[in-house]
Each structure stands twice: as C-alpha cells, then as structure tokens.
Image: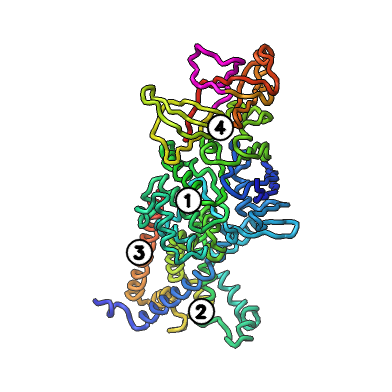
Amino acid sequence: MTESIVARFSIDYVDFSLGVDLRLPGVGVTALFGPSGSGKTTCLRAIAGLERPRDGYLSVNGEVWQDDAKKLFVPTHRRPLGYVFQEPSLFPHLSVRGNLEYGLKRAGGATEGDGLERTAEILGIAALLDRGPEKMSGGERQRVAIARALLTRPRLLLLDEPLASLDLRRRHEILPYLERLHEELEIPSIYVSHMPDEVARLADHLVLLDKGSVIASGPLQETLARLDLPATFTDDAGVFIEARIAGHDQADELTRLDFAGGTIYVPRRRPPTAAGRVRCRIEARDVSLTLQKQGGTSILNIIPATVIDMAPTEHAAQVLVRLDAGGTPLLARITQRSWNTLGLAPGSRVWAQVKTVVLIG
Amino acid sequence: MTLGGAFSDSDLAAIWLTIELAGMVTVLLLVIGSPIAWWLARTPSRWKRPLAAIVALPLVLPPTVLGFYLLVAMGPHGPIGELTQAIGLGLLPFTFGGLVVASVIYSLPFMIQPLQNAFEAIGERPLEVAATLRAGPLDRFFSVAVPLARRGFVAGAILTFAHTVGEFGVVLMIGGNIPGETRVASVLIYDHVEAFQYAQAHWLSALLVVFAFAVLVSVGALTAVGKTARQ
C-alpha cells in the first residue's frame, strides 16, 4: 500500500473529541465508516481545512496542507480538493452552468469548455445546464454538486454522505455514477458513510471510526474480516467478496458468479453490468461449517475453506470463525459447542455452507 | 392647481437638497455599512454585543443628543473639527458636508440591521462551499454573500434613504436652516408652519406622507417575496 495521505488530528469540543492518526492510500476510494457521532464528518472537515484542529499534521501525496509544528495551515481555498456536502449545496443565485463554472474558473480552467460538457455527460446532467437549481430533484442537484467539485480538477475528492439526504430510489440513481467515477477518474477519494452497502460498493480501503477514534484501518475485505472489532460492528459481521458474472442458468433463474475461492450461485436479479464485476455480501450468521462436503442438502453454495482463527463474540455461546477460501476471507458465526465437537483449530479444512449471498452491485 | 404651482422655488430647492442628501448618505452607508454588518453577522468576538448596541444607539437616543455631541465634536475645538481643519476642509457644522456626516451616523442602524439579518440568514454552508471551490475570503463576500443578501441590500438602502428624508432634529442641530445648503424638506415644513403658511406646509407634508407610505409598501413586498422564495 502506498501511504500517501497522512492525517494526524486532535479536536476538542465541549462534548466531543476527535483524535486520529491515519495513513491512507493515495489512490482509490477510502471509506470513513462509523455510527453517527463517531467523528466521520469532523474528520473530513478537518482534512478540508473547514475545521481547525490543534496539533494537526496533514499531507496529501507529498504536499503538506497542515503542520502545526511549523505553524503551517493552508486555508481551504488554496487546497486542491473537491468537497461534496451531505445536502446538495448549490448556489441558488446561479444556474447549473453558473454553479459548474464557479469552481472551474477559479481553479484556472476557464477555457475548458468541453471539460464541463464531458463531466456533465458522465453525471447525466447535460440537459439541465441552463436550469436554476430550485426546479431540480435532490438527486439531480447532488449530481451537479459532484460535477462542480470534479471540475476543479481536485487532487483529493472528499464526499460527506452524499446520498444521505436522498430517498432510496434517488440513491440507486446516483450510486452507478459514483461507481463510474471510481472506474474512470483516478482521483483519490475519501467517502464518509454509515451505510454498509455504499461502502461495499465503492470503497477499496476502510477506516472504522467510533467515538472520535480510529478502531480499524485497512483494505476493505481484510478489515471487514477482522475479528477484534467491537460488538457494535461484528453484530452484523460479514464479508464482501469480489466476483465476476460467469453466466446465467436460464431454467433455474440463477446467476453463476466466479470468485477467487470458487463458484457461487445467486438468484438472477438483473442484466449483468458492462464490466461483469460485482460485489456480494455474506453475513457471518448465514455461514455454517461441515468437515465433509454434505450431500442431500438444500444449501446451494458450499465453499471449501481453511480455518484461520477464532474469536469470541458478545454471545458467550457463539464464536466467530475466520476462514480463507482461496485468498478470499469469510466469516462464520457458529456455537462454541460446534467448534469443540468438530475439533476445529487453525489450519482445519472445512466446507463453508452459505445460506444467503446478497448481490450488492 | 398644478404641481408647479403647489411648490415654490424654495420648496423645490429643499426637495432636491433632500434627495441629494438622502442619496449620498445611502451610497456612503452601503460602503461603510456592509463590512460592519458582515463582521457583526459572523464574528464570535465578545465585542459583538457592545458594537451592535453602539450601532443601534440612534434608534433610541433623542436626535438632539446625537446632534449636540456631533456639533461639539465637529466644532473648532472638537476632535473631528480639528481634523477637518488640519486637512483643509474647514468646519463641518452648518454645511452640507456636516449634514452628510451626521446623517450617516444617524441612519447607521437602518442600513446595518437589515444587512446583518440578511448575512446571518445565508449561514455558513454556501461560504464553505465557495471555499472548497477555491474562492478566497473577499471573493466569497462578493460572489456569494452579496448576491444571496441582495434583499437585505435593497431593504437597507430603501430604509436608509427614507429615514434620511425624514430626519429633523439632527439636521436642525448640525445644519441649521440655510437655503440651498442645509434647508431640507422637513426643516422647511417647520418654517412654513412658523410663518403660518399652512397651504405650503400641507403640500410638502402630503408629499412626505405619500413617499413614506410607498417606502413601507415596497419594503413589505420585498420581505413577502423573500419569504415565498424561501418556502
């Protein structure tokens, strides 16, 4: 991992304090994930320079934006960043085009007419350019806000729950655009969210925050499969796996997915995406373990795996088992008794029976 | 009776002088009032309240009190008077310039309060957005705060103009009653009444009533439009 974003902050408010020491990759999407009040937004605002932490240090791909030891603080408007706020904050006195040009001009891209058109095209707002913001839906406004941030050609894109103010339908309208950005533009991004499915679809790197401190930080799949996370998170423990659509079984209405650990079937839901790449979520409580491959079972997805380790859960009767399936981490929630009767130990070969696989995108 | 017949030459001179004075005070207060209102709207400083109180003082002080202090300050031994003499402007009392200075101070709250309210209503967010789009502090003020507070500017300008037209006590204390120099409409009405010229007093007074009514209706309409626009 290239550790290209270094952020060290502490902020004290009357009823809340934030203390983080983060090293993040300088490429891809990093998700700041945690319950509300965990300090995600404050952390993002500090990176943007909208909050002034004390004793802060921040460098982004070699450029130092804040170093209080050297009394250095680059104000927000001199940081080459893009920021998308939770609610679509368009300037009401400007048209869509005026909003887009606001940042474009100030970032020194005045002559880039087609940059504006192209970005508007990617975000599906080309037809709205001459409208005023008040006559648009929340989803359209948020897409304009994203385009406006991108047109400043930021070297770091910060997104603060950009979908939170939208209803479910609008969310599904915007998510594909965010995925496209992820694939087509190589801007490192930090994405604040408290929605696991958004994180799973978009993020490469995951930072878990709780009560103002970092609980975990690492590549998405590795981090989700860690056992030492507090109960609040492992309560619905599970993993995300990257898979490729390998084909469809017309007669049974099933889609076959190939991933590093083998093949799984999911109910056919929609035509395959162009890339053919999808992510699925498997919850620990939907995975059971057997020593031999079972016949005569209704379970469709049975994956060979190796036990890596085990951790207790908040339930004394249950344990979480971490598995490795051809390089893909899996979690299984089983009883302490089963662990003992099956004689499981790190290195045991098992079959993971997966009751439910949720196709995310 | 035609309008030309209703107003004598000295009436028309006083009306023109009034418009000149109110126009100049409005322009000056737009320039002076904006930064003060901006600061009051955004500062976390503990000096905010005392300063806001000083700005609001003309609302409650008798105009004679304000006029008296200004007269002393601008007089030959007052600090402002010594300054204006030193830079070759002579003395301000009983001149048009003196009226302008006094009116600016007297009408200060009528410009600053609507502006401050308008700036406060914008909130932090649009300015933060502008900062993330590379706009520096001055740029943010002119490209975001001013257009978003334009109703406050219009309301402040109308109220300042109207209030300056309607002032009497301060004018009398500072400017006296010099035709073509400091004799504005409100002072002239007083003269007419003193001289038992009731017909002329009526015409001028009616003109000011109509003007004041029009001002209040337009400010009211402006506020109503602002409310529906926000809904």
Closer to us: A100 or A244: A244
Q: Which mark is residue A146?
A: 1
- Crowding at label 1, few (<14), some or many (≥20) Cα neighbours within 10 Å? many
Chain assignment, label 4 = A
- Mark 4 vs mark 2: in front: 4
Closer to us: A73 or A173: A173
- Crowding at label 3, few (<14), some or many (≥20) Cα neighbours within 10 Å? few
Q: Residue at x 51, y 55 (%)?
A: B126
Q: Pointers 4 and 1 in contact (CB under 8 A)? A: no
Q: CA distance from mark 3 to mark 4?
A: 78 Å
Q: Helix or strand or loop: what does disc 1 sit on?
A: helix
Across and down, in percent, residue A213 comes to 68, 40
Task: State which tag comes first along the sequence, 4 or 1.
Answer: 1
Quarter-of-image position of residue A267: top left
Q: Pointers 2 and 1 in contact (CB under 8 A)? A: no
Across and down, in percent, residue A61 comes to 64, 54
Q: Which residue is mark 3?
A: B214
Task: State which tag comes first along the sequence, 2 or 3.
Answer: 2
First to last magenta residue range:
A282-303
- Asked whether, in this view, residue A263 is left or right of residue A34, the answer is left
Q: CA distance from mark 2 to mark 1?
A: 59 Å
Q: Which residue is mark 4?
A: A260
